[in-house]
Amino acid sequence: MYQSDIELRLLSKVEKELTELYETGEIKKGKLLSKQIENKTNSEFYLNNKVYPGYNFGNLSFDTVFCHLNPGGDPNPSQFKSQFIDTCRDEKEFIENYIEQSIEYAKERFLVKGEFDSFDYKQALFLSGFPNNGIEFASINDSNNGFKNKKNQSKDCFNVLTQKTQIELIPYQSRKFSSIFSSQKQSDKLSQIIKPYFEEILEIITNKHRKYAFFGSSQYEQIINSYNKLYPSFIVKKSEKYKFDVGVAKKVYFTMYKLNWQDKSFHVGIAHSFARRDLPNAFKAMKKYGELCAEKYLAFKSFN
């Protein structure tokens, strides 16, 4: 499983949080973050710190890394306690179960059960446009049927989860996290709170040379701008905000950045429209979006 220094540090942090969750029924860090956000935004805000956090127990060193904001959803804490905490003998078993479930989740759901997930499949479709990304795309010949071959869909959901590095900015679940970045001014207010979480992402991204790195929501543009106000040399270069027509009602957008963090320069693309709700089941549109973004990504990278 984890072997590198950064992976071992992450494992230590996860074990601490899970021990708290098992012994007290909540994760203190998640509770504190909720309060900090409430204080800065002057509005009620809730992160579910009473269920499993969303940490990645896959390989953190794949060629492609995709960063999201946080795990969606809001599981019932009482049901979680009865199903996952009360059934364990001690915190060691609780932690082991979490790690095992995290590792085996994709295999069990998509290869054994043959299930489908629209969010994971749209990741596969988007990333399929980027050559040599290290992710096998089983649906490569399915354009004629609209990429609706169920067997290949399940394979691609599995592949995209197990052949890339996926990170959440905030590991605690919430359905409303993106709403706190309602403006650049609001993002600036939150910058010191978000800073350690964002820097953990930056450390993972720059832990090795990546072929591709992505931020999967428009809010990351505000986060990058806020961080650059704290560290003005962070943004080295930025492209225009590209606008594409992919056959859905609204245009889709993409921006490239060259960033510098701790004397390490790297390229990253912001897929502004990736999280939009009109795209998950528009398979051809999502694939075209990825292909158009790939052209801009590679062109920007070659000249910068």
Image (cartoon, grey):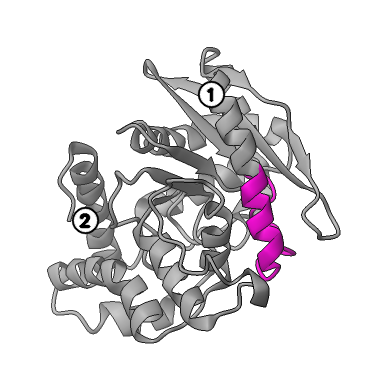
Q: Is residue 258 left or right of residue 292?
A: left
Q: Which of 38 and 121 is in front in this view?
A: 121
Q: In the figure, 146 relative to 192: above or below?
A: below
Q: Quadrant of the N terminus?
A: bottom left
Residue 154, image x, y percentages: 46, 76
Image: magenta residue range: 271-292
Q: Which of marks 1 and 2 is in front?
A: 1
Q: Quadrant of the C terminus?
A: top right
What residue would you read off at disc 1? 302
Q: Nearer the viewer, residue 252 or 226?
A: 252
Q: How crowded is mark 2: few (under 14 residues within 10 Å), some or many (20 or more)?
A: some
Label 2 sits on a secondary structure element that is helix
Residue 237, image x, y percentages: 60, 18
Q: For the point 37% across and 15% down, which residue is it?
A: 263
Q: For the point 32% across and 80% down, which residue is it?
A: 108
For marks 1 and 2, the one nearer the N-term is: 2
Q: For the point 19% across and 79% down, which residue is it?
A: 88
In magenta segment, residue 272: yes
What residue would you read off at disc 2? 15
Residue 78, image x, y percentages: 42, 80
In magenta segment, residue 277: yes
Q: Nearer the viewer, residue 113 or 130?
A: 130
Label 1 sits on a secondary structure element that is helix
Q: For the point 24% across and 39% down, which residue is it?
A: 6
User: Which amino acid, mark 2?
Assistant: Glu
User: Which amino acid, mark 1?
Assistant: Ser
Q: Which of 133 and 279 is in front in this view?
A: 133
Q: Is residue 262 left or right of residue 168?
A: left
Q: In this view, does 245 lie to the left or right of 219?
A: right
